Amino acid sequence: MKYSEIMVRYGELSTKGKNRRSFIMRLAKNVRQALVDFPRLKIHADRDRMHLVLNGEDSDLIIPKLKMVFGIQGFSPSIRVEKDIEQIKKCAQEMVSEIYTGKESFKVTAKRSDHTFEQTSNELNVTVGDAVIEQFPEIKVQMKKPDINLRVEIRSNGAFLSHETISGAVGLPVGTSGKGMLMLSGGIDSPVAGYMAMKRGVEIEAVHFASPPYTSEQALQKAKDLTAKIAPYVGQIQFIEVPFTEVQEEIKNRVPQGYWMTITRRMMLRLTDSIRQSRRGLVILNGESLGQVASQTLQSMVAINEVTNTPIIRPVATMDKLEIIDTAQKIDTFDLSIQPFEDCCTIFAPPQPKTKPHLDKVHQYEERLDIEGLVERALTNIKVEEIVPESAQEQEDEFAELL
């Protein structure tokens, strides 16, 4: 079926009152970024609905991308015809004929926002319903939970017919809650944390710590690939690579083994907070799950958090591992996350890390480090790269090869 438009219904945006317009405009921007590969598509964001005019673009390619945009409750691919009763009846018959197998029930739900149209909503329900029954005399009419709900909407620019409502990603448009820095490792938890934060409207930038030659190019690419997996939910994500080799070597040489992890995490947090400040982020996000590893006990979190007053959001903190894995599989990051490439948190993992580190000892051991110098040198050499969804990246690579 060749659709002319996709009608988008908002989710939580309907509760935003005076701020509603800004939320809608942000959602429109995110939809445009997610559908950048469809240049003929036109977006019209109204107060109650968003309308995507396809202008010949393939709805079958657009729908999977649109399903991943946060802030959308649902959407319906629609066919536009002139505001003429006979054309509306004909379109309704053709639409039902493509999906009716002889078993389904149906009803018509008409809505008339153009009150100059010759029939009321109730009259349209009867007119269009009679046209369907005329073509399919055996079809059953069912008002509650029909198999086919044929929607007819009369607007100023035409009549729009649809029969399918596709669920959206719900949540809030990414960016409406501000920006946060996601501490992205190569594991299962942090991409899930990023996904969950974006669902609540947070624009994320991924901060990844690399320690070559201890961590490999494959490990770095894995982190970028994980970022590309969650990029479709917003369109693009900034990936920030932080050189961490010198920091880890200094910690290994000057700090007792039991405190390697605590002080390593404190240094990571210091660096992430400095990056957040320079890039105007509001919060830090990570994939810590309470009690999962030594650095994620409450005592360890208190000791690590001491280096910053910036709010730290842990979206998966109270989830167990199976719940996190379920979400990772849902967003297609799990298989990539379990690839066996070492990250910064595992290469110097001590055999017996402190689960209840003492702050006085942490301070004592950190006095052995040139913390300001280590932070300054790491920040001087960070690399920032824009990560786009896989399909868009493939197109860019092909274009680059042609050049």
Image (cartoon, helix red, strand yellow):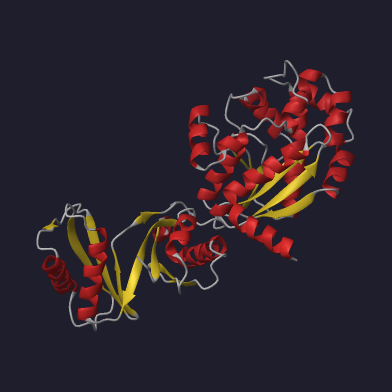
Based on the displayed image, in which of its 4 quarters is residue 292 positioned?
Answer: top right
* Residue drawn at 72 percent across, 15 percent down: 352
Position of 110 relative to 251 (above/below): below
Horizontal arrangement in the rendering, residue 22 relative to residue 145 (left or right): right
* Residue drawn at 70 percent across, 28 percent down: 303
Horizontal arrangement in the rendering, residue 47 relative to residue 349 (left or right): left
Task: Please state which of residues 361 and 142 is positioned toward the viewer in this rendering.
Answer: 142
Task: Residue 16: give x, y in percent of width and height.
Answer: 43, 60
Q: Quadrant of the C terminus?
A: bottom right
Residue 214 shows up from this direction: yes
Position of 280 relative to 350 (above/below): below
Based on the displayed image, in which of its 4 quarters is residue 132 positioned?
Answer: bottom left
Task: Residue 301: give x, y in percent of width and height.
Answer: 65, 29
Task: Residue 322: give x, y in percent of width and height.
Answer: 49, 28
Q: Residue furthest top?
A: 352
Task: Please state which of residues 193 and 306 is positioned toward the viewer in this rendering.
Answer: 193
